């Protein structure tokens, strides 16, 4: 006689809906935890060796330094950290820092195009002294010339560009002896010694009849005090922040340039990063770039007040005399730009370089550099 076996227990098809929902929720939570951990693990862990611009100025304090020391570390869960120093701390010129970026001594460098043009003359094309007087046109020109800058950084320094931004307007700040001297124009720069930081500005100064004196930013104030220089060229807000108003009398409002600046990363370093790390850095860099353009426009307006009679939210007004350009001044600028700046730069840079400029910035401005 067969022994009867108990019937197999079958799971009820009427499993309570709440139990199913609970199980799904538990699984989803567990999977979500794994996903979050996986994403965090995909950021390449690295302490970056970074050079920024100047720690005393807004670009470094409000944008460059926070990008490296706050934003990226927080968003990467601590995978990205940075040992960051500015130009003053490293004690090097722009082209020297870029040479060390190429060698891999630095992983990333923020540098002015004009400071690095010694090894790549085409970089200076975006800030040819006196050529662009309007800030809005400058951003259009920058966008048009961006491919050239990216190419130069890649070919000359084996670097990838992550940001392209600017400093405030660059103008002349001069000591004419007394603030009571109100009838001042560009013709009064003839025979005077003016501080420059680029070959292009030196050409512009010569075109105006002055003598160019190359000085690092930190040495300008003592040079003006001792008479080594009569005028200095720099950004309108950097001039106020560095208290140039204590040693000069006049702000000559000819726009020399806008100090185009880039963030470049060593290409070998970049290639070691995970796609997620690269995307994070590019996305956040784009946000910083936009923020700098917006803040720089505001700084241009505020600096005009801070350097003269105010009001100034940053402190006491500098009390300089503002020198606005008249028709004769504008004619002098045109001569200096066409006969000195564009002509000499095109010769330094070469035929193809000048053609690239004409096809980009030249079209934006309706100006052409001579092609020889």
Image (cartoon, rainbow, N blue to C red):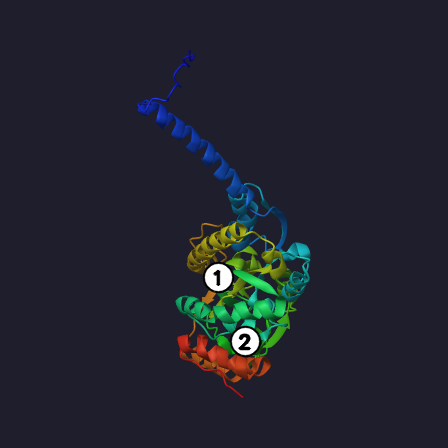
Q: Nearer the viewer, residue 283 or 317?
A: 283
Please provide percent x and percent y for residue 20. 36, 26
Q: Quadrant of the C terminus?
A: bottom right
Q: Nearer the viewer, residue 321 or 252?
A: 252
Relative to 154, is 360 on the left or the right? Answer: left
Would you say residue 196 is visible in this rendering?
Answer: no
User: From what the image shows, is residue 136 above or below residue 191?
Assistant: above
User: From what the image shows, is residue 88 above or below residue 191?
Assistant: above
- Pointer 2 local density, CA inside 10 Å: few below 14, some 14–19, many at least 20: many
Q: Residue at x 49, y 39 (%)?
A: 36
Residue wearing tag 2: 189
Residue wearing tag 1: 168
Please provide percent x and percent y for residue 111. 58, 62
Relative to 294, is 72 on the left or the right? Answer: right
Q: Quadrant of the N terminus?
A: top left
Relative to 310, is 57 on the left or the right? Answer: right
Q: Nearer the viewer, residue 351 or 222?
A: 351
Q: Quadrant of residue 151?
A: bottom right
User: From what the image shows, is residue 92 above or below residue 32?
Assistant: below
The secondary structure type at the circle numbered 1 is: loop
Please provide percent x and percent y for residue 247. 58, 61
- Pointer 1 local density, CA inside 10 Å: few below 14, some 14–19, many at least 20: many
Please provide percent x and percent y for residue 82. 61, 48
Q: Residue at x 41, y 78 (%)?
A: 363
Relative to 371, is 11 on the left or the right? Answer: left
Name which of mark 2 and mark 1 comes first in the sequence.
1
């Amino acid at each position: 006689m067969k022994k009867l076996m108990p019937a197999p227990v079958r799971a009820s098809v009427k499993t309570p809906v709440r139990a199913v929902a609970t199980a799904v929720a538990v699984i989803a939570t567990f999977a979500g935890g794994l996903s979050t951990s996986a994403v965090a693990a995909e950021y390449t862990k690295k302490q970056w060796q970074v050079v920024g611009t100047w720690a005393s100025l807004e670009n470094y304090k409000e944008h460059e330094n926070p990008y490296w020391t706050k934003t990226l570390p927080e968003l990467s869960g601590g995978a990205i950290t940075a040992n960051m120093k500015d130009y003053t701390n490293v004690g090097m010129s722009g082209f020297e820092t870029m040479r060390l970026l190429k060698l891999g001594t630095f992983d990333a460098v923020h540098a002015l195009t004009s400071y690095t043009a010694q090894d790549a003359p085409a970089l200076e094309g975006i800030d040819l002294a006196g050529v662009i007087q309007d800030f809005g046109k400058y951003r259009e020109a920058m966008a048009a010339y961006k491919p050239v800058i990216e190419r130069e950084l890649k070919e000359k320094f084996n670097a990838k560009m992550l940001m392209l931004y600017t400093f405030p307007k660059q103008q002349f700040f001069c000591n004419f002896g007394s603030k009571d001297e109100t009838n001042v124009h560009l013709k009064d720069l003839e025979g005077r010694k003016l501080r420059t930081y680029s070959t292009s500005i030196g050409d512009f100064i010569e075109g105006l009849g002055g003598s160019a004196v190359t000085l690092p930013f930190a040495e300008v104030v003592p040079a003006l005090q001792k008479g080594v220089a009569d005028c200095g060229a720099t950004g309108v807000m950097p001039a106020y922040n560095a208290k140039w108003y204590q040693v000069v009398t006049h702000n000559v409002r000819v726009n020399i340039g806008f100090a185009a600046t880039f963030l470049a990363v060593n290409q070998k370093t970049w290639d070691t990063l995970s796609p997620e790390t690269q995307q994070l850095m590019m996305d956040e860099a784009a946000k910083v770039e936009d923020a700098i353009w917006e803040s720089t426009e505001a700084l241009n307006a505020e600096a005009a007040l801070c350097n003269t009679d105010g009001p100034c939210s940053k402190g006491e007004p500098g009390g300089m005399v503002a020198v606005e350009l008249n028709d004769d001044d504008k004619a002098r600028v045109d001569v200096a730009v066409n006969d000195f700046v564009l002509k000499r730069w095109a010769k330094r840079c070469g035929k193809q370089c000048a053609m690239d400029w004409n096809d980009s910035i030249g079209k934006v401005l309706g100006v052409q550099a001579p092609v020889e």
